Image: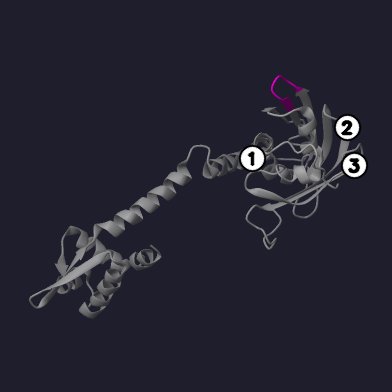
Amino acid sequence: MDTLLAALADPARWRLVSLLAERPRPVGVLAQLAGARQPQTTKHLQTLERTGVVTSQRTGQRRVYALQSAPLRELADALTRLADAVDQVDGPRATFDRYGLSVRDERLAAGESKWADGRSFEFHRELSTGPERVWRHLTETALLARWWTPDDLRVSELVYEARPGGRIVQEYRDVEDIDGTDVIAGRGEGVVVDVSPNERLSYRLSPLLPDGGLAFTAHIDFGLRPNATGTDLDVRYRITDSTVDSADFIAGIEIGFGQSLDKLAATLAVEPDDTNTRSTK
């Protein structure tokens, strides 16, 4: 496939393929129609023949070339699969596009400091395990690291001291930046405000701008209630101290935080009960 793509990328060879799609033709005629010299045309045809997309046979004193459809159909199928992956409903590209629209709107709205103060977001998830296990995933760093980022990010540094006044640090990178050579995707710092084990957790967390300043302050409250099958988790996310430069961060809250909670739900659904496992905080 790579060889075929490289061959077809040349405009002169693509012109020959287009001419051969109409009907088989001898090299001399192809050279005339393409407006090229015959030796150059012969070299291009030989390159195409090596990829399997063109075949030839000698007829008298002429060599006639014809196009092979199978390699083109394989290429078309591969391109169709790529396009289908891009267009999948609620796939990564759809999320990218939604975020782009949100960024545009938030940048237009961010005219002065405190422009987004008081804005809030509410999330609800029905989790398939009891409050005690959910609580551990909200407060223990080893368990937090499994879900506390959107789908395309991973935690690269995490501090969470689950006590009032406890320190919070959340740094994250692209999920595929395993060796940490790419730039940090984001970093937030904050403090735990209230802790009622298995019932309520609240903290403040501020994403940092590239210059180290605070983008805004997020006041985040988790409420846990047992139900017949597990736990009802309700989250309220409220913004204060918003700066003009916080627009891109705020644009991603609903999508990104929602994805993190979906990862939490998926993690609790598929992982075995790890009540006896404890992390070092």
Q: Seen in the image, is 275 located left or right of residue 178?
A: right
**Residue 231 falls inside the magenta stretch:** yes
- Residue 220 makes an appearance in the image: no
The picture quadrant where one finds residue 231 is: top right
Report x, y in % for residue 202.
83, 33
View extreme (top): residue: 228
Disc number placed over residue 166 in the picture, else none: 3
Q: Is residue 153 left or right of residue 88?
A: right
Residue 222: where, in percent of width, then height? Answer: 78, 30
Mark 2 or mark 3: whose residue is earlier in sequence: 3
Q: Are marks 3 and 1 in contact (CB under 8 Å)?
A: no
Which of pointers 3 and 1 indicates the residue nearer the eye?
3
Residue shown at the point (47%, 40%) measured from the top left: 88
Residue at label 1?
A: 108
**Residue type, numbered disc 2:** Asp
Q: Which structural element holds mark 3?
A: loop
The numbered dot on residue 194 is: 2
